[in-house]
Structure formats: structure tokens, C-alpha cells
Amino acid sequence: MEGSQLQRQAAAMRRTLFEQGYLDEQFIQLEELQDDANPYFVEEVVKLFYTDSSRFIRNIELAMERNPLDFDKLDDVMHQFKGSSSGIGAKKVKKECTQFQDYCKAGNAEGCLRTLQAVKQEHANLKRRLEAYFQLTRQI
């Protein structure tokens, strides 16, 4: 595919990520840190996020198996996950993390369980979309 066509396609894909609410301005700030000396900076930061976030999700799943639930611990781990999500501009993931924390504060186990599934789904959706975006940008 021609370079300018790939650039237009990547720009459209990026614009869609913002328009559909997957990303916020923090992602733009990451992009501004990328330069010729480190052309894959954003992609590397996102890969680190997915490594860390998989661990956070696993820790939350393990904590959800305990009875009784330790809502303070769940809230603490989700707070860390939300901070990590915020760092890359993962807007929808961050929103679901906040909802999970609200359920923790209310002591609502069913809400936590339901929202954890939403967190995992938004996390997977964003990962799939960003992988496609980065794959395209590497071709430019």
C-alpha cells in the first residue's frame, strides 16, 4: 500500500479511537514525547501498560474469589489499575475502573463482579484496536 494512503488510514483509525471514547488527551501527551530517537515510544509504553494491567486484573480476580471480599484491597488494586490506564489515556477502561471503585465503596459484590467483566472487555477492546493501529503505523 502506498505511504500516503497508509498515513491517511492510520490517521482515520487514530481519530476513531478518540471519537469513540477509547482514548483521551493523555495519549496525545505520550505521542508528543515520541521522536526520531525513539520512534516506537508510545507503542512501548502501551505494551508495558498491558503487561502491568494483566497482572492487576489477575490480582483482582484472585481477590474476588475470597470470602468475605476485602473491598479495601479490591479498591486499592483497582486504583492502581486506574492510574495505569489513565497514564496511557485509556478513557473507557478508566471509566469502568471508577465504577468498580464505587461498588467497592458501597460494598456491592455483585456490582464489582459485573463491572470487572466490563473492565476486562474494555481492556481487551482497546488492546485489539491499538495493536491494529500500531501495526499500521509501523508500515508507514
Image (cartoon, rainbow, N blue to C red):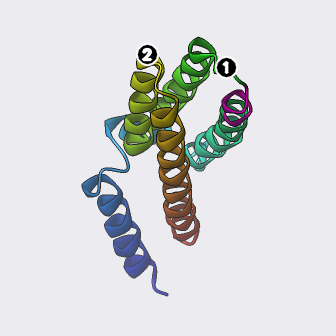
Magenta portion: prevailing SS class: helix
121 or 106: nearer the eye? 106
Q: Secondary structure at mark 2?
A: helix
Please, which residue is most extreme toward the left here?
19
For the residue carrying disc 2, how many other residues have a C-alpha within 10 Å: few (<14), some (14-19), or many (20+)? few
Depth order, front residue of 68/114: 68
Q: Which residues are magenta?
A: 61-66
- Helix, strand or loop under label 1: loop
Q: Which residue is mark 1?
A: 68
Q: Is residue 63 magenta?
A: yes
Image location (x, y in percent) of residue 38? 61, 43
In the image, what residue type sits under mark 2?
Lys
Query: Going 30% across and 50% down the picture, which residue do you hit?
Result: 21
| The quadrant where residue 32 appears | top left
> What percent of the width, then of the height, locates residue 56?
67, 32
The residue under the point 57% across, 17% down is 71
Q: State the residue in front, 46 or 118.
A: 118
Residue 50 vs 106, above or below: the answer is: below
Q: Which residue is mark 2?
A: 105
Q: Is residue 66 left or right of residue 72?
A: right
What residue do we see at 49% from left, 54% from top? 126
**Looking at the picture, how far across and down is residue 97, in whole percent?**
46, 32
3D distance between C-alphas at marks 1 and 2: 15 Å
